[in-house]
Amino acid sequence: MEDGQKKIGLLLTGGGARAGYQVGVLHAVQQILQDAGHFGGPSPFDIICGTSAGAINATALACRADSFEDGVAQLMSVWENFTVDQVYRADSLGIMRSGARWLSILSFGWLLRKWRANPPNSFLDNTPLVSLLHRMLDLPRLDAALASGDLHALAVTASSYSGGHHITFYQSVAEIAPWRRTQRLSMPAQIGIEHLLASSAIPLIFPATPIYCNDHQEYFGDGSMRQIAPISPAIHLGADKVLVIGAGRMAEPAATVTETPTYPSLAQIAGHAMSSIFLDSLAVDIERLTRINQTLSLLPEEHRNKTPLRPVEMLIIAPSQRLDSIASRHVGSLPISIRTLLGGIGATEARGGALASYLLFESSYTCELIRLGQADTLARRDDVLAFFDVDRRSRRRAPDQAAEPTLGHIGGE
């Protein structure tokens, strides 16, 4: 990167199987840039940040930062061919050892405690995800991308059950001072499989992951928990502009109620709680950054230079359709063992679609999310081109030409 050139960040949020939408957005971005003359080459993103399933996509993309096209193609290959048994055990024995026992203890815990039964650690067993991550990631390539300058930094966020704080683990070659806020801190680290398992450990659904940090071992869960400022890591790592790919609510239509509401099922309540964890904090953070940008634009330059705040250009792309409604149409693609298990808590009903939307790692669902992501992004072609300033990014590969300054803008809904 040339000195003084603006750094572009990418934020991939959490959401389990909903993260398939991110892949469609990235594929469309790659297509838009290619159609505009951006042929191949390194990733257009200098800083990549991810949380939960978004952390896995972010790391896969970062490992192939030397070729954006290859990175997107690999993500497409995985998400277009997903089956749940690549993420969690769906066989009858695996279900009996986790979900079925978990529900039994929930119902008859008072009796089972007398037998000194050891409860399962989670509703589902995500052991297969470890194998998928090893096949999907080439972590030595991440080191090479950072060393060559194709990538400035990668950040993965997780939440500590042990310490009660929220930690952003980041890897970079450049010296970047850690930051600390109330119940939020950062830590330089060599990003590994354990960080991704921790960041994507949906509370109660998947087991917590131990990570050695702060001179001792702590247990971590999904990074979306207590994440009150999702865009903050990208800014702290130096991003001047950030592409934010959401997983719902910001652009999707409101739910319509066509019948008399009935008492919510356990799945409906769990889905509502998960949506609060995964979606609400991002919307609030976007509103906060938009207000900061607007306030800074009103200040005279001499006063603006005295504040530690700086404007951050954003482009937000989020689903235009309700993902829980899409999920409810694909629940039948789940293995019968999983359908039976989820049916016991109401997740196979239409009103339980929110919970199903996070667990439905089946290609019929993820491919529809990919197509939606592609369509939503292609509809924003002009915004994408303006955000990337394609001419400037092309000059990045022609060092004999000087980069020209551009004016920022805030894009998205």
Image (cartoon, rainbow, N blue to C red):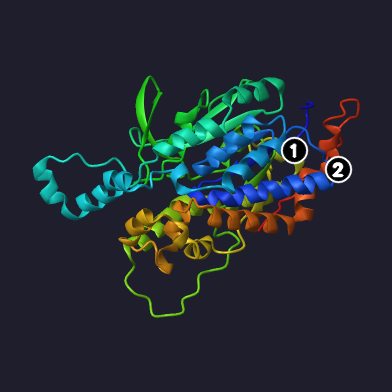
Using the image as rendered, state which of residue 320 and residue 304 is in the foreground. 320
Q: Please state the horizontal and vertical placement of residue 288, each as a whole percent of the image.
A: 58, 50
Q: Secondary structure at mark 1?
A: helix
**Residue furthest right as drawn:** 400
- Decide: is 189 above or below 122: above
**Residue furthest left as drawn:** 114
Mark 2 neighbour class, 10 Å CA radius: few under 14, some 14 to 19, many 20 or more: few
Q: Position of residue 389 (x, y in %)?
A: 81, 43
Q: Earlier in the sequence, mark 2 or mark 1?
A: 2
Three-letter code, disc 2: Gly
Q: Residue at x 34, y 61 (%)?
A: 343
Q: Secondary structure at mark 2?
A: loop
For the residue marked with disc 1, what is the amino acid?
Answer: Glu
Q: Which label is found at residue 86?
A: none
Which quadrant of the figure has residue 403? top right
The x and y percentages for residue 259 are: 42, 80
Which residue: 62% across, 26% down? Answer: 142
Q: Locate the N terminus and report the quarter of the image it occupies.
A: top right
Residue marked by disc 2: 37
Where is residue 355 shown, x and y percent of the image? 42, 57
Residue bearing mark 1: 302
